[in-house]
Image (cartoon, helix red, strand yellow):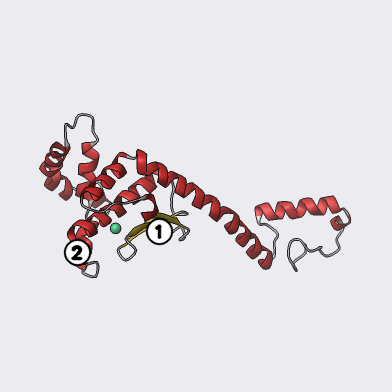
Amino acid sequence: MSSNGSPLSSSAPSSSADDPLFEKWRKNLSWITGLGLSEEEKQIRQKERQERIEPLLLKKCNKVKDSLMTTSPSIVFMLRHLRLSGCLVEPEHIQCVPCGNTTAGGFSPELGGILVCSQGFSNRKHMENTIVHELLHMYDHCKFKVDWGNLRHHACSEVCVRRRAILSVAQNPNCPDRQAAETAVNEVWESCFNDTRPFDEMK
Ligand SMILES: [Zn+2]
Protein backbone atom coordinates (compact mmCIF):
# COMPACT_ATOMS: atom_id res chain seq x y z
CA MET A 1 0.00 0.00 0.00
CA SER A 2 1.32 3.43 -0.86
CA SER A 3 2.48 5.45 2.11
CA ASN A 4 3.76 8.56 0.39
CA GLY A 5 2.04 11.56 -1.11
CA SER A 6 -1.57 12.64 -1.09
CA PRO A 7 -4.33 10.14 -1.82
CA LEU A 8 -4.63 11.69 -5.24
CA SER A 9 -1.08 10.87 -6.28
CA SER A 10 -0.46 7.57 -8.02
CA SER A 11 0.53 4.72 -5.75
CA ALA A 12 3.53 2.46 -5.91
CA PRO A 13 3.19 -0.33 -8.44
CA SER A 14 1.45 -3.39 -7.11
CA SER A 15 -0.56 -6.16 -8.64
CA SER A 16 -3.82 -4.27 -8.09
CA ALA A 17 -2.42 -0.97 -9.37
CA ASP A 18 -2.49 -2.47 -12.84
CA ASP A 19 -6.26 -2.20 -12.60
CA PRO A 20 -7.08 1.52 -12.39
CA LEU A 21 -10.68 0.85 -11.44
CA PHE A 22 -9.67 -1.39 -8.56
CA GLU A 23 -7.15 1.16 -7.37
CA LYS A 24 -9.73 3.93 -7.52
CA TRP A 25 -12.14 1.82 -5.52
CA ARG A 26 -9.46 0.97 -2.94
CA LYS A 27 -8.63 4.65 -2.44
CA ASN A 28 -12.25 5.64 -2.11
CA LEU A 29 -12.77 2.94 0.48
CA SER A 30 -9.66 3.99 2.41
CA TRP A 31 -10.89 7.55 2.31
CA ILE A 32 -14.26 6.55 3.77
CA THR A 33 -12.96 4.21 6.46
CA GLY A 34 -9.67 5.97 7.21
CA LEU A 35 -8.00 2.54 7.11
CA GLY A 36 -4.75 2.02 5.29
CA LEU A 37 -3.98 5.73 5.05
CA SER A 38 -0.60 7.23 5.80
CA GLU A 39 -0.31 9.80 8.62
CA GLU A 40 -0.20 12.58 6.04
CA GLU A 41 -3.26 11.23 4.27
CA LYS A 42 -5.07 10.91 7.60
CA GLN A 43 -4.42 14.57 8.34
CA ILE A 44 -5.67 15.64 4.92
CA ARG A 45 -8.77 13.48 5.42
CA GLN A 46 -9.40 14.99 8.87
CA LYS A 47 -9.01 18.53 7.56
CA GLU A 48 -11.26 17.86 4.60
CA ARG A 49 -13.93 16.41 6.88
CA GLN A 50 -13.73 19.39 9.24
CA GLU A 51 -14.05 21.82 6.35
CA ARG A 52 -17.06 19.94 5.03
CA ILE A 53 -18.77 19.15 8.35
CA GLU A 54 -18.18 22.45 10.20
CA PRO A 55 -20.35 24.60 7.89
CA LEU A 56 -23.11 21.97 8.02
CA LEU A 57 -23.09 21.93 11.83
CA LEU A 58 -23.04 25.72 11.91
CA LYS A 59 -26.00 25.91 9.57
CA LYS A 60 -27.92 23.36 11.62
CA CYS A 61 -27.05 25.17 14.88
CA ASN A 62 -28.36 28.50 13.53
CA LYS A 63 -31.53 26.87 12.28
CA VAL A 64 -32.27 25.20 15.63
CA LYS A 65 -31.37 28.38 17.55
CA ASP A 66 -33.68 30.57 15.43
CA SER A 67 -36.50 28.11 15.86
CA LEU A 68 -35.94 27.82 19.64
CA MET A 69 -36.04 31.61 20.01
CA THR A 70 -39.65 31.63 18.85
CA THR A 71 -40.96 28.20 19.88
CA SER A 72 -39.30 27.20 23.16
CA PRO A 73 -41.55 28.32 26.05
CA SER A 74 -38.61 28.72 28.47
CA ILE A 75 -36.49 30.68 25.99
CA VAL A 76 -39.43 32.90 24.96
CA PHE A 77 -40.13 33.45 28.68
CA MET A 78 -36.51 34.45 29.37
CA LEU A 79 -36.40 36.75 26.33
CA ARG A 80 -39.57 38.48 27.50
CA HIS A 81 -38.18 39.06 30.99
CA LEU A 82 -34.88 40.29 29.61
CA ARG A 83 -36.81 42.75 27.46
CA LEU A 84 -38.85 43.87 30.47
CA SER A 85 -35.59 44.45 32.36
CA GLY A 86 -34.35 46.69 29.57
CA CYS A 87 -32.21 44.14 27.73
CA LEU A 88 -33.49 43.40 24.28
CA VAL A 89 -32.01 40.13 23.00
CA GLU A 90 -32.07 39.81 19.23
CA PRO A 91 -31.12 36.65 17.28
CA GLU A 92 -27.67 38.11 16.54
CA HIS A 93 -26.93 38.30 20.28
CA ILE A 94 -26.95 34.51 20.34
CA GLN A 95 -24.23 33.32 18.00
CA CYS A 96 -23.44 29.81 16.81
CA VAL A 97 -19.68 29.33 16.55
CA PRO A 98 -17.47 26.31 15.92
CA CYS A 99 -15.75 26.16 19.33
CA GLY A 100 -14.97 22.46 19.74
CA ASN A 101 -17.16 19.74 21.18
CA THR A 102 -16.12 19.96 24.82
CA THR A 103 -18.25 23.02 25.63
CA ALA A 104 -21.86 23.75 24.83
CA GLY A 105 -21.85 27.51 25.17
CA GLY A 106 -21.06 30.58 27.20
CA PHE A 107 -22.09 34.10 28.08
CA SER A 108 -19.73 36.96 27.37
CA PRO A 109 -20.46 40.05 29.47
CA GLU A 110 -17.97 42.06 27.37
CA LEU A 111 -19.69 41.21 24.12
CA GLY A 112 -23.12 41.25 25.73
CA GLY A 113 -23.94 38.04 23.92
CA ILE A 114 -24.17 34.28 24.10
CA LEU A 115 -21.97 31.85 22.21
CA VAL A 116 -23.45 28.52 21.24
CA CYS A 117 -20.92 25.87 20.18
CA SER A 118 -22.15 24.30 16.97
CA GLN A 119 -20.36 20.98 17.61
CA GLY A 120 -21.28 20.74 21.27
CA PHE A 121 -24.86 19.48 20.99
CA SER A 122 -26.33 16.07 21.29
CA ASN A 123 -29.87 17.27 20.54
CA ARG A 124 -32.35 20.15 20.45
CA LYS A 125 -33.23 19.84 24.17
CA HIS A 126 -29.55 20.10 25.08
CA MET A 127 -29.25 23.33 23.09
CA GLU A 128 -32.44 24.66 24.66
CA ASN A 129 -31.11 23.98 28.18
CA THR A 130 -27.79 25.62 27.33
CA ILE A 131 -29.42 28.76 25.92
CA VAL A 132 -31.73 29.06 28.96
CA HIS A 133 -28.73 28.67 31.29
CA GLU A 134 -26.79 31.38 29.46
CA LEU A 135 -29.84 33.66 29.26
CA LEU A 136 -30.09 33.44 33.05
CA HIS A 137 -26.52 34.75 33.27
CA MET A 138 -27.48 37.49 30.85
CA TYR A 139 -30.53 38.30 32.97
CA ASP A 140 -28.41 38.52 36.15
CA HIS A 141 -25.90 40.68 34.31
CA CYS A 142 -28.62 42.96 33.00
CA LYS A 143 -30.67 43.23 36.16
CA PHE A 144 -28.22 42.90 39.04
CA LYS A 145 -25.00 44.29 37.56
CA VAL A 146 -23.03 41.16 38.44
CA ASP A 147 -19.30 41.55 39.03
CA TRP A 148 -18.06 38.42 37.18
CA GLY A 149 -14.62 38.75 38.77
CA ASN A 150 -16.25 38.21 42.15
CA LEU A 151 -16.51 34.46 42.80
CA ARG A 152 -19.55 34.84 45.04
CA HIS A 153 -21.38 36.83 42.39
CA HIS A 154 -20.49 34.24 39.76
CA ALA A 155 -21.47 31.32 42.00
CA CYS A 156 -24.78 32.96 42.77
CA SER A 157 -25.54 33.23 39.06
CA GLU A 158 -24.63 29.57 38.49
CA VAL A 159 -27.08 28.41 41.12
CA CYS A 160 -29.99 28.80 38.78
CA VAL A 161 -31.59 25.42 39.47
CA ARG A 162 -34.30 26.94 41.63
CA ARG A 163 -35.26 29.36 38.86
CA ARG A 164 -35.12 26.55 36.31
CA ALA A 165 -37.48 24.56 38.51
CA ILE A 166 -39.93 27.49 38.73
CA LEU A 167 -39.81 27.87 34.93
CA SER A 168 -40.59 24.20 34.42
CA VAL A 169 -43.40 24.05 36.98
CA ALA A 170 -44.94 27.23 35.50
CA GLN A 171 -45.32 25.29 32.24
CA ASN A 172 -47.40 22.58 33.91
CA PRO A 173 -50.98 22.91 32.57
CA ASN A 174 -52.22 22.60 36.16
CA CYS A 175 -50.25 25.67 37.21
CA PRO A 176 -52.40 28.85 37.20
CA ASP A 177 -49.55 31.39 37.26
CA ARG A 178 -45.90 31.98 37.97
CA GLN A 179 -46.58 32.85 41.60
CA ALA A 180 -48.10 29.40 42.17
CA ALA A 181 -45.02 27.80 40.56
CA GLU A 182 -42.73 29.81 42.82
CA THR A 183 -44.70 28.85 45.91
CA ALA A 184 -44.68 25.14 45.01
CA VAL A 185 -40.91 25.13 44.38
CA ASN A 186 -40.14 27.09 47.54
CA GLU A 187 -42.33 24.79 49.65
CA VAL A 188 -40.44 21.66 48.66
CA TRP A 189 -37.02 23.23 48.18
CA GLU A 190 -35.37 22.42 51.53
CA SER A 191 -36.45 18.80 51.67
CA CYS A 192 -35.72 18.05 48.02
CA PHE A 193 -32.43 19.92 47.87
CA ASN A 194 -31.02 18.12 50.88
CA ASP A 195 -32.21 14.77 49.62
CA THR A 196 -29.44 13.69 47.26
CA ARG A 197 -30.53 10.06 46.88
CA PRO A 198 -29.60 7.93 45.01
CA PHE A 199 -26.25 9.69 44.61
CA ASP A 200 -25.11 9.47 48.24
CA GLU A 201 -25.64 5.71 48.12
CA MET A 202 -23.13 5.33 45.30
CA LYS A 203 -20.11 6.34 47.39
ZN1 LIG B 1 -23.08 29.10 33.84
- Residue 50 in the image: state x and y as whole percent: 57, 58
**Residue labelled with disc 1:** 103
Amino acid, disc 1: Thr
Q: Is mark 2 within 8 Å of ligand 1?
A: no
**Residue labelled with disc 2:** 153
State the residue in front, 52 or 86: 86
Quadrant in the picture for the N terminus: bottom right
Residue at the extreme right of the image, as rendered: 18
Residue occupying the point 66% across, 53% down: 33
- Residue 139 in the image: state x and y as whole percent: 24, 54
Amino acid, disc 2: His
Q: Are marks 1 and 2 in contact (CB under 8 Å)?
A: no
**146 left or right, relative to 6:** left
State the residue in front, 143 or 44: 143
Quadrant in the picture for the C terminus: bottom left
State the residue in front, 178 or 196: 178
**116 left or right, relative to 146:** right
Residue occupying the point 31% across, 51% down: 89
Quadrant assignment for ligand 1 = bottom left
Question: Which badge, 1 or 2, is on the more N-terminal residue?
Answer: 1
- Residue 82 in the image: state x and y as whole percent: 25, 50
Q: Say if residue 197 shows up in the picture.
A: no
State the residue in front, 171 or 33: 171
Q: Determine the image quadrant of residue 38.
A: bottom right
Q: CA distance from mark 1 to mark 2?
A: 22 Å
Q: Determine the image quadrant of residue 144.
A: bottom left
Give above or below for 57 relative to 141. Answer: above
- Residue 90 in the image: state x and y as whole percent: 35, 50
Residue occupying the point 21% across, 38% down: 169
Give above or below for 61 relative to 109. Answer: above
